[in-house]
Amino acid sequence: NLNGVLPFPPGPPGLPLIGHLHMLMSDNSVPHIFLYKLSQKYGPLVFLRFGFKPTLVVSSAKMAEAVMKTHDLDFCSRPSLCGARRLSYNASDLSFSPYSDYWREMRKLCVVHLFSRVQKYRPIREDEVARLVQKICRLSIDSKPVNLSEAMMCLSNSIICRVGFGKRYDDEGAERSRFDGLLKESEAMLSCFSFSDYFPFMGWVDRFTGFFSRLEKTSKELDIFYQQLINEHLDPNRQKPEQEDILDVLLRIQKDRDFPFDLTIDHIKAILMDVFIAGTDTTAATVIWAMCFLMINPKCLKKTLAEVRDLIGTKGFVNEEDIQGLTYLKAVIKETFRLQTTVPLLVPRETLRKCSVGGYQVPAKTLVYVNAWAIGRDPEAWENPEEFCPERFIGSSIDYKGLNFELIPFGAGRRVCPGMHMGVAAVELALANLLYKFDWEMSTGMNKKDIDFDVVPGLTTHKKNALILVARKIK
Ligand code: HEM
């Protein structure tokens, strides 16, 4: 083993104690762009130190393959960060659990019993997309602008509530806004910087800034929310939905003792959190970015519209079977993932042990960011990386399933996103129907040039300014 003599990957010089944190904090860009700029200077493996935490940034398709395939076993743990730890009932969930026997069993449970149910939830997705179309129809009658960003969040939240716990909230009701608020706050707590993660002796700063009390408040509110859902599900008089929802399935597994570990109510709550957090923003943001790209690329928009309308004819609604034939639409979605990766830094990984990659050594417990956004621009992997060109995927076998490392919006390897099929099904169905039913125009006084690509930092890249368009219902 040459580990001992290998150098660390290159990186900029850091300061004592804080390492490179000041660079991250003082740069005006969002983290994935800041890290991309560093990779342009130092290469596809950059070594940094955030406080006491060694950090590796991976920015090319080749190095992503080394990390997530060749050395996946060394890189497939997750760091224990304070926000995630608290919200996931001490990492009892799937996303934030370190690599362990527990994670393996949890992954099996989720893949076999939860994520395999994609097809069963098809009627829910179709019903919710049909409701979205009706809502937009009503606005289109008076040419009222449609806030697509809001409408898409509403759609994915509605889908996840029905899939997760069998409830359909009124769009404007109090229960709905409670759920939306909890989701937003949890996302914020998961992507918020906390001192104690990087300086083990500086927990007092988090107490001082109010981070801990905010985290405590959010976790307690979430816990009450989950507990109410569980109580309702355990009520023998509850009217069961047609399809068992995810909470039903989990409670059944618990009752049947169909899990090698003790599956407690807290574990079930933790899994619910994963489904809510991982499954809503990602789907909504992907559709919004795809619409942005189409609006500023009229040729691509025209081709997509022609394909959808030719194939569907006068049927009135694109259902999930029809999607198979929509080759160009699928290419548009892939190109959207390449250029505006929804989860740009994936979900941070952590090295299990001291290991080596690309001729460098990486210490145990190094935080690892795979910059999928940068990989989408890797000049070794893509011709004309800055262009929006869905055609590059026509007749190409490159897919986002985690086997082609130039396109990894869902990650790859042992930790690859298990909700990929669920996410893609919703994205495709929503986008296809938005384009089948309506022509889209800029609202009065706005120009295509006004569509910006400014983003809000966070786990998921959201568009900073809402996408507001006018829909014209086609005859
Ligand atoms: C467009 C939609 C989505 C995108 C872009 C996306 C992206 C990702 C990414 C990048 C990861 C990290 C993978 C890695 O570390 O290699 C991930 C993990 C995960 N995703 Fe998704 N996701 C989407 C939809 C969903 C949905 C709908 C669900 C569930 C209902 C879901 C559940 C999860 C879970 C549980 C994990 C953690 C897996 C583990 O650590 O073992 N995702 N996702």
Image: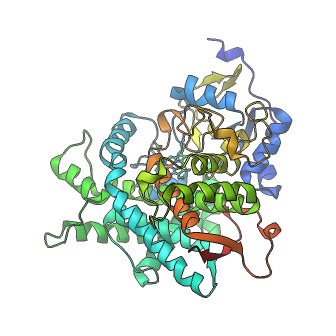
Q: Looking at the figure, which quarter contains the N terminus? A: top right
Identify the residue shown where x is 66% and y is 70%.
Answer: 440
In the drawing, does residue 179 fall left or right of residue 457? Answer: left
Query: Where residue 48 sits: x, y (%)?
Result: 74, 39
Q: Residue at x 37, y 47 (%)?
A: 115
Q: How is the image coloured?
A: rainbow
Q: For the C terminus, which image quadrant?
A: bottom right
Q: Residue at x 50, y 39 (%)?
A: 416
Residue 396 lies, in percent from the top left, at 62, 34
Residue at image location 60% in from the left, 32% down from the top: 404
Q: Choose top left, top right, bottom left or bottom right for residue 261.
A: top left
Is 14 on the left-hand or right-hand side of 138?
A: right
Quadrant of the image occupied by residue 64: top right
Task: Choose between 155 and 460: the one closer to the eye.
Answer: 155
From the viewer's perspective, tell me whether residue 361 is left or right of residue 432.
right
Residue 96 visible in rendering: no
427 to 4, vertically: above or below: below
| Above or below, comparing residue 97 to residue 174 in the picture | above
In the image shown, does 77 or 212 lie closer to the viewer? 77
Where residue 81 appears, as percent x and y from the top left, is 55, 50
